Amino acid sequence: MTTPTQNGTTSQGLGFWKILGIIAVVLLALAIVGPLLKGLFWIAFVALAIYGGWVLLRSSKKNHNGNSY
């Protein structure tokens, strides 16, 4: 059972459009943010690999030469 609101439309119909609008906004946000996060993941992965290699190199130099940086 629906109850009319002040402008003559039903509250059930207004709720449908509100939910549909929220779903559309969420899908649009995911379409924009998803590829952005995917690209940032690979950039962060490569940066972490480079940093790890640099730490290993610095560690091995410290052990061989006996001096620390």
Image: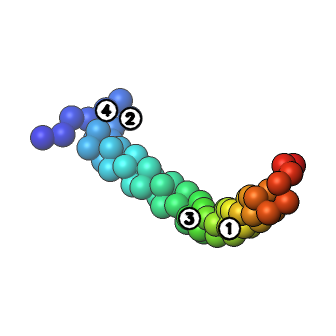
Q: Nearer the viewer, mark 2 or mark 1?
A: 1
Q: Is residue 56 left or right of residue 11?
A: right
Q: Provide residue 22's location: percent of width, then percent of height.
A: 44, 50
Q: Is residue 64 left or right of residue 39?
A: right
Q: Provide residue 58's location: percent of width, then percent of height.
A: 79, 59
Q: Name the residue tied to disc 2.
A: 7
Instruction: Report how far apart the C-alphas of labels 1 and 4 lie in the structure.
Output: 60 Å
Q: Name the residue tied to disc 1.
A: 49
Q: Which mark is residue 38?
A: none
Instruction: Report how far apart the C-alphas of labels 2 and 1 lie in the structure.
Output: 61 Å
* Amino acid marked by disc 1: Ala
Which SS class for mark 2?
loop
Q: Name the residue tied to disc 4.
A: 5
Say which of 50 and 26 sits in front.
50
* Amino acid marked by disc 2: Asn
> Mark 2 Cα within 10 Å, few/some/many (few <14, many 20+)?
few
Q: Name the residue tied to disc 3.
A: 34
Q: Provide residue 1's location: percent of width, then percent of height.
A: 12, 40
- Judged from this view, the residue extending furthest toward the top is 6
> Mark 4 Cα within 10 Å, few/some/many (few <14, many 20+)?
few
